[in-house]
Image (cartoon, rainbow, N blue to C red):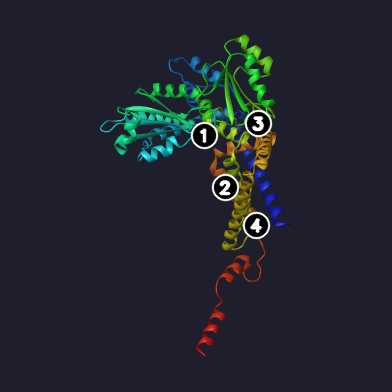
Amino acid sequence: MNPRWRQVLLMVAYFLVLMLVARIIDLLIWHLQGLTPNQEVDPRLVLGVRQLKALLDTRGVGYAGCVEKHELAELVYSSGQVVNSEVAVLETSENEVKARIAAPASHFTGGAHFYEEVEDTKDSVWLVQVAPEGAEPPLDDYSWRLVCAHLAPFAIRTGVFDCKLDRRLCTGKGWHEPLLLLALPRGTRAKDKVLMQIFKSTKPQSIIAWVRQQLSDRVERLQNVSEATQWVESASKSESDSQVRLLLFTKLSSPPLFLAALSVKFAGRVRFGLLQVKNKEDEDVVKSSLGIKSRTTYLLSTPQGSYIYGSGREEHLDFKTMHNFLRAVQPEANDALLVSLALCQLLAVLRAATKRSLLGCLLTILAHNLALLAAWLAILTLSRVPFVASPFTEAFSCVSRWMALSKPGLWLRADQNLLARYPKVLLCTLLLFLLAVRQCFLEEPSEGGGYGWRFLSQLLPSPTITLTRYAKDLC
């Protein structure tokens, strides 16, 4: 068999092995807990107060003033359904929060560093403590780390800027007293200008609520069901690849922070909307008009059709999981580059596993990466041609959306999210598979020590020829 076709078949076999490993993990979870990972859990009956608060923190829903368990459970239920696999990762999330609280705060090294990270980065949100010269930051160290730990899961970056590092910057900005600075893109277009908001409270909960409010303003508010229906249907009628829309039907008056933060990351690619379902009558109208079954629904609308987020396996309501989902549905060039790089490395490692010499393995990996580099240079060159770039981009977007929302795409992404929680299992599976490939397809030894040795011997001078030339020179 041709080695190239063998590589492709081995890669497909490796993905099938990963799917088998994921099924085994599902069976173990079902055996130990008695619940399937995608089985819905009633937060009012199953979860405790600590778990309810952890879920609300993960989703970015404020619960200030809620004391009773049924109030917390109602907030969780209003922000979306809860499945068993989401509850299973709560302990890991709590440990990550504790680790972030213990971590030291990050500081800017100067004005240039501030400009580079905050004002030149157009797709990130920054919360910065500004300390004027000779004064302390507005928050003490523990309170600041507490705020950072709550905002970090939503890709909100934090830092401390000391004005003594750049007095001219602070004077020009008018920062003469301790304050908090929130920097985020101004509009809904990609790479839009950065807008800076100022806040002077020193209470962590007030700061988190303020950040949540500022980001929630980026989500469009729809007034009634007819407006929501037109808003959703306009995505399916549009041929533009930027008309992907995500609409949240909920009882909440403002969106969860994870959804509002995603509106910054996907500015210009995905539009986010919210329709508040206030009563039973509104709920019945929404269900009959749009065909949804639950009061709280995340409805994704694309030119290829609609999809309800959360109906598939491992589709949790948190920033990281939905971020990966939307990257698959509406990818950009960097996402395609990362996927192609990962597949190229997998193909290279599978081919290198059949080589006998270390040099042969290294040359194989180098050849695959050079081929990938040449392919991407050709793609980037063609993308600068106007009549080629637009059709190519539209075709790429349509194919990626179709693959992401197809059954195999949903299975692969669910298995990826599951195996990402068990990196040691993933590493052991890869090593065992490479060992099996080496045992079955190891190349036969050839004369001259193999291709790698022949290649190296051609680069090095021959000792016999060198001595002969030296003797002739002496004569």
Density class for disc 2 (Cα within 10 Å; few <14, some 14-19, many ≥20) is few
209 on left or right of 356: left
Q: Nearer the viewer, residue 454 or 334?
A: 334
Amino acid type indicated by mark 1: Lys
Q: Residue drawn 50% across and 15% down? A: 70
Earlier sequence position, callout 1 versus callout 3? 1
- Residue 34: give x, y in percent of width and height: 60, 28
Find the distance from the CA under tag 2 to the CA under tag 4: 16 Å
Foreground mark, 2 or 3? 3
Say if residue 141 shows up in the picture. no
Q: Residue furthest bottom?
A: 475
In the displayed structure, 189 sits above or below 217; it is: below
Q: Amino acid at mark 4?
A: Gln
Badge 2 amino acid: Cys
- At label 3, the amino acid type is Ser
Q: Which residue: 59% across, 59% down? A: 361
* Disc 2: which residue: 428
CA distance separating discs 1 and 3 = 19 Å
Q: Specify which label sits upstream in the sequence, 4 or 1.
A: 1
Query: Do labels 4 and 1 touch, CB within 8 Å?
Result: no
Which residue in the protein does label 3 denote?
240
